[in-house]
Image (cartoon, grey):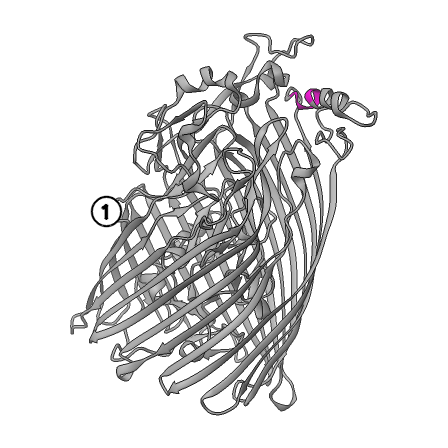
Amino acid sequence: MNRWKIMFLLAGCAPCVAFGQAGSASTAATPPVHVDDSSLGEIIVTANKREENIEKVGLSVQAISGAQLAERRIISLEDVAAAVPGLSYAPSANNTPIFTMRGVGFNESSLGVYPAVSVYVDQAPLPFPVMAAHSAYDLERIEVLKGPQGTLFGQNSTGGAINYIAAKPSNTFTAGGDFSLGNFNDTDVNAFASGPISDTVGVRVAITSHHMDDWQYSITRPNDTNGHQSYSAGRGLLEWRPKEGIRLAFNFNGWVDTSQPQAWQMIGVRTQHPEFQALQFPVINFVPNNPRAADWTRSFLDPALGVVNPATGALVPGTAQLHDISPFGDRSFEQGALRADIDLMQGITLTSLTSYDNYKQHQSIDNDGTALVIENFPIMDGYIHSLNQELRLANATTDRFRWILGGNYEHSITFETQLNRYLHTAYIPANLYINASDINNTQHIRNYAFFNNSEFSVTDKLTLKAGVRYTSSQNRADICSFTIPGGNVDKLFNVLGNLLGKVPFTPIGPSSCYTLNSNLVPGQPFISTLAESNVSWRGGIDYQILPNTLAYANVSRGYKAGSFPSLAAALFTALEPVKQESVTAYEIGLKTQPFDRMVTLNTAIFYYDYKDKQVRGKLADPLFGALEALVNVPKSQIYGAEADATVLPMRGLVFSGNLTYLHSKIQDYTGINYLGQPNFNSAGDPLPFTPTWSASVNADYRMAREWGTPYVGISVNTRSEQDAAISAQRLNYFSEPNVVLRSGVGCVYCVAGYTTADARIGYESKDGRWNVALWGKNIFNKYYWTNVIAAYDDSARIAGMPATYGVTFGYKME
């Protein structure tokens, strides 16, 4: 459903509201009805796949309520990460999100790879990172579980898990919506309707739509702009209780996104072929410290569309045709999930959760941040089909011995094709004027697992915990690198096969696989199967020191499956998968609510033993120099501490804040660094995306009066410097030949520390039926960036959003 259809539907839904009844708020910029603030209410979470008070759960869990999501306008993945210290977000080179929790993450841009921080909607998995793009709307809350979650949430949760809890159908009819206007012609629409349609059936429907005009401008073409955002998402929930003891819930959600991929900011060039120094250096245009400034290729004279001299392979002058490769995006996602809960004898419940995910993308991305064709992907298409089934048995939460026993099955098919154009990088006589590489990567993935999680209350104060999961995974990859007519890569690899090959071969054409196999000849796809198994486990103790104070200690181990890269590789060795990684975590914590629950304080300290961490690194290709590859870092460690607090000093005023300290260190890794230098020892360096300090502070004040309730709030988020690549702070670009850096750039692959502030002010009517709010994000227009990407010849930043602000109008009816 596109944005205009949604706008049409909303036009027919005049009485709308941005929020529903308590616990069912949407994530608009309008707050829920204020009930009471004399003490902090009870927050229910499902961290153990049971409904429990968050203060009684002996885990590091952070919950962001629907009210907080609405007031703070948390709608994107970056917003979620900013609200959770210890959680980092970065966009990848291929427009897929990267989450890193307490230093555990996977900085990989391929479409069909598992994350280290898994994401769920009502416990139904979104198994691949790109699927989580637009889920933060019409939610009861977001739960963030820190540390390995392998026993209950499966492998690929070595960093943690994020669970979006959708707002459920209400017992009485309620509906609502809001409309927002902001700078860059930002328009946002949210709406929902909820209520019973019979004594046994309840329904809830919610939609959201966002549009924003181009917010970036080209530094070489002042009238050219980029970066418009446009997506629509919807969710429908149906709950049916056909008879006593049987509960069925169907959840369908999906989105369509035609946003333009963000353009990058090139900060340095290091030509790997000296022949290009004279071509690239004179036309380098560095961006200022302005989030809106960037550059990208709009069109170029394409030699693959021209006439080539058959004797030399060179383009006949004047015959190249203009080729438009402007950035664009067209992505869509649908998920259907069916949950059945059946009460059996003696308080035992059988739960079945079945979900099917379908994702498609068609996009063009400029990966170099320049107007040149250094690393452009005019075709970056793909799809994912994923089926997941979970069956589990659980007894009552009131039993002294509580247990969950179950199993999972997953079958996924992923496909990705990437056409890489590099006219200003490798189009030279020595390479036979190669200019285009394409790759098809098809993966068939099968996983199954069996798990148990148990808790035993030895006394009213002491509880012992244990969990275990066995997982078997299998991934069969079929990878073929090829070219296009006029791309000339086939011609080059025919020559290489004749020079290096150990056996005769049939010369290849543009559509044949060119990667050299073990006999150093082209013509075959890379086909390989990665089969792995593991046992995740957890043990722990909870001790209720006082009725309002819980101490806990946990030790756990989790695994993340290995994966294959999507690379246009010269040799089969570059396509080998990384093996599974593991994290063994030790944590102790304290949760307390003193002063009659006027204060909530949670603290934890932790240590992680990290084995075989998967990272996007480099390999020394004998033909093309330093190329990207997936590698394992044998041994690392992470330790740290965190604290979060909420204080109610007076009626209407709420202070909250949290702080995380992280120290990460690579203990064993020697390999090719980002400059292509071999045998580089990275021991002692921090892991990527692990800021030493991260914190947030929020203050909200509501003044209830007879004539209504005005309110005001401010949020401040801060993070210290972090690396975007291994050994980033020790990579000396200045000592390398053929290098030009932007003035003021020291550490090329570092993400500088930054602090941003958001604010809101509004008014809610006396009857709570309508409200208006003014809001701003990054109100001081802080320039910051979230990632630094290395293309073949240059390095570029991905900047954070500039200041955005607007007004929201909301109305509700019940």
Q: Give x and y (percent) for residue 21.
A: 37, 73
Report whether 45 appears left or right of 360. Answer: left
Q: Give the overall secondary structure of the magenta segment.
A: helix
Examine the structure image and report whether residue 490 is included in the region drawn in magenta: yes
Task: Name which residue lies at 49% across and 65% down.
Answer: 147
Snapshot quadrant of residue 514: top right
Quadrant in the picture for the C terminus: bottom left
- Viewer-nearest residue: 240 or 409: 409
**Image position of 568 with respect to 237: above or below:** above
Examine the structure image and report whether residue 84 is included in the region drawn in magenta: no
Please, what secondary structure does the residue beneath circle 1 have?
loop
The residues colored magenta run 488-492
**Image position of 215 with respect to 87: above or below:** above
Residue 250 seen anywhere in this rendered image of the structure: no
Task: Name which residue lies at 47% across and 71% down.
Answer: 169
Q: How many residues crowd mark 1 within 10 Å: few (<14), some (14–19), many (20+)?
A: some
The residue pinned by badge 1 equals: 780
Report whether 90 appears left or right of 510. Answer: left
